[in-house]
Amino acid sequence: MNAGASLASWATLTESSYGGGLTAEGVEAVGTLLADLQRVLGPTWPGRQQLAFGGLPPELGMFYFHAAALPQFLNLALRLRAAVEEPTFGPVRSALGRGLNPTDWRHVLLQLEVARLGGAVGRRARFEPTIPDTGRSADVVLDDPASRDLVVVETTSLFRSVRNQQHSAYEESLNWSLLAIEQRYGVFLQTQLTAHLDADGTATWLRNIDDAAAHARQTGAPASVSSPAGTVIVRVHPTPDGMTTFSGALATEDSWRRLARSIRGKVRQTSGSTSAWIRIDALDGFFQFTGWIRYSWRDRVDALANALRVTFADVPHVAGVVVSSGLATSPGAIHSTNEDDDAITAAGVGVRRCVAPHVVRETFIIPLQSAVEPQVDAWTAGYASEPRWLDDDLQAAGLPPLSALWQ
């Protein structure tokens, strides 16, 4: 956060809702939910949260101008509204009220998400349950009153490494430069990266692409411009439907090692006589920038299951692991028919859903114990139904559906 930046307030958050992409109904709904948040978190909370986070979290700072951020703001407000009715949420509410850093913020969001999943499958969520025979607590327990089956859940998120951030920043910068060339000459570029170049090499490649674009505009003939980093095809007509216009290079970092290390930390946290599930959001690019994207959908399930079972073969108390991409922004993701997918193998389950316009999630449910099929079914049914959660919650709060809130 910049030293001279003014602190956010409920008034500034409310005012911001008037200048973005919200409809009149959206502005009214946001105002109602901001008032709810103020009652729960106190009159000066936005400023405390801004200071602790180093700026406003995207759920609060972007909801009024970014279509993919609005559902996440609504989720936060509606889930928090429901959670405060649960007595065991008190310690989590107190921590949230003091303001949270990015890691702890994500942790609370994930606890609220698991609790919402419990509600979707008829399970009561309790927060910070004590793990029997230990001095430790888990994050959430989902209680099925009919069967008395308990799903003890420990949550965590894996954030991007510095190396991964540099990888992403290079490709974002290159993509902006290529878009500028497209606009300058009225051409269409199709890019396939296999590696990254240094600054001088990138500048030389971009000059060659610029020259090819100018020539293509004059002659109408397509051109291909290659470098050690990949190939750019220049056309004067739009790229054919179904063809990717920008394909990045695969990250070379050992993302599985980082993911396994993060899970291992939660394995220690839950050790004891009670079985527990580890629920992790891989927010480090594991799903987007590694060799993962080359696997078929079913192979992704089996590859992840094999890696988990080999790595955690010595861990008898972990019932299973649920790995998700988190709510990932996908600009082209509009219709569920084009995005949704399921894979059920002997090793586990994969669920992909278009959760809201421009927002998708991939989730993999991998059991590591036998006789946990009811719990696997609960995780699967919960995440398969996630696209309905928000509109159901809006309706329960007496608010219009998401489609009525955004222009």
Image (cartoon, rainbow, N blue to C red):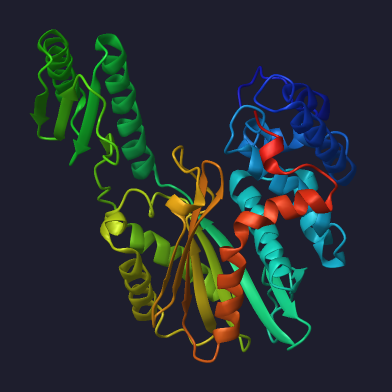
Q: Position of residue 255 (x, y in %)?
A: 34, 57
Residue in view at x 40 percent, y 67 percent: 260
Q: Position of residue 193 (x, y in %)?
A: 20, 38
Left or right of residue 210, residue 270 in this image:
right
Q: Residue furthest bottom?
A: 371
Which residue occupies the foreground of this view, 180 or 92?
180
Q: Residue furthest top?
A: 218
Question: Can you say which quadrant of the picture contains the C terminus?
Answer: top right
Question: Can you say which quadrant of the picture contains the N terminus?
Answer: top right
Residue in view at x 25 percent, y 23 percent: 188
Which residue occupies the foreground of this view, 46 or 300?
300
Regarding residue 203, the answer to whether it shows in the image is: yes
Is residue 270 positioned above or below 178 on the image? below
Is residue 183 positioned above or below 255 on the image? above
Regarding residue 254, the answer to whether it shows in the image is: no
Q: Quadrant of residue 100?
A: top right
Which residue occupies the foreground of this view, 358 or 148?
358
Residue in view at x 72 percent, y 23 percent: 16
Q: Position of residue 41 (x, y in %)?
A: 84, 44
Residue in view at x 61 percent, y 75 percent: 378
Q: Position of residue 296 (x, y in %)?
A: 29, 63
Left or right of residue 328, residue 216 in this image:
left
Q: Quadrant of residue 21?
A: top right
Tally of numbered tags: 0
Left or right of residue 281, residue 232 in this image:
left
